[in-house]
Image: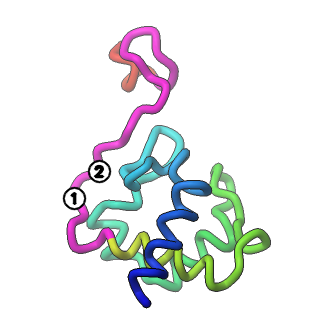
Amino acid sequence: TDAEVIAEGAKLYSVACSHCHGPEGQGTPIAPALNVQSFLSETSDQAIKAIISQGVPDTRMPAWGGRLTDDQLNALVSFIRAWEPTAPAVAQPSRPGMTGRGGMGPPWLRGQ
């Protein structure tokens, strides 16, 4: 069922994607938001699958196509697409490992 596919996608996302894109797809300093209206409305399912499968050159986005089956890729796309009805207009990136001044990351995220 669709719910089972989305649940499988959620499991895969938590293991393979959440570290970089945030647990709810909100983005982080190292990877863009996926759970945001602009990405979801402007990016087709086929394009999302291609990004996951082939990676993105000159970024930290790896190619997962050799590690995930076609069904797993489709489950990830379904999970990401399930955010669309409630996606925020503007992403609120998380800042893992950053604790204000003296934290890691770029100056604008460290409060400097």
Image-based side of 94 in relation to 52, left or right: left
Residue 91 in the magenta stretch? The answer is yes
Name the residue: 34% across, 72% down: 40
Considering the image in quadrants, where does the C terminus appear? top left
Residue 41: percent from the left, percent from the top?
31, 76
Across and down, in percent, residue 72 comes to: 62, 77
Q: Which amino acid does label 2 sit on?
A: Ala
Is 108 rendered above or below residue 64?
Answer: above
Residue closest to the eye, 100 or 5: 5
Q: Mark 2 points at which residue?
A: 91
Tell me what residue is drawn at x 51 percent, y 71 percent: 9
Q: Are marks 1 and 2 in contact (CB under 8 Å)?
A: yes
The crowding category of the residue bearing disc 2, from other C-alpha atoms within 10 Å (few below 14, some 14 to 19, many at least 20), is: some
- Chief secondary structure of the magenta span? loop
Q: Residue at x 20, y 59 (%)?
A: 89
- Look at label 1 and name its amino acid: Pro
In reply to whether residue 87 is colored magenta, the answer given is yes
Q: Give the range drawn in magenta.
A: 83-106
State how far apart marks 1 and 2 are (Cα). 6 Å
Could you tell me residue 66's position as x and y percent? 79, 72
> In the displayed image of the protein, which residue is found farthest to the bottom?
1
Q: Residue furthest right?
A: 66
Q: In which quarter of the image is residue 65?
A: bottom right
Q: In this view, does 98 lie to the left or right of 68?
A: left
- Count residues near mark 1 (Cα–Cα under 10 Å), then give few for <14, some for 14-19, many for 20+: some
Label 1: which residue?
88
The local secondary structure at tag 2 comes to: loop
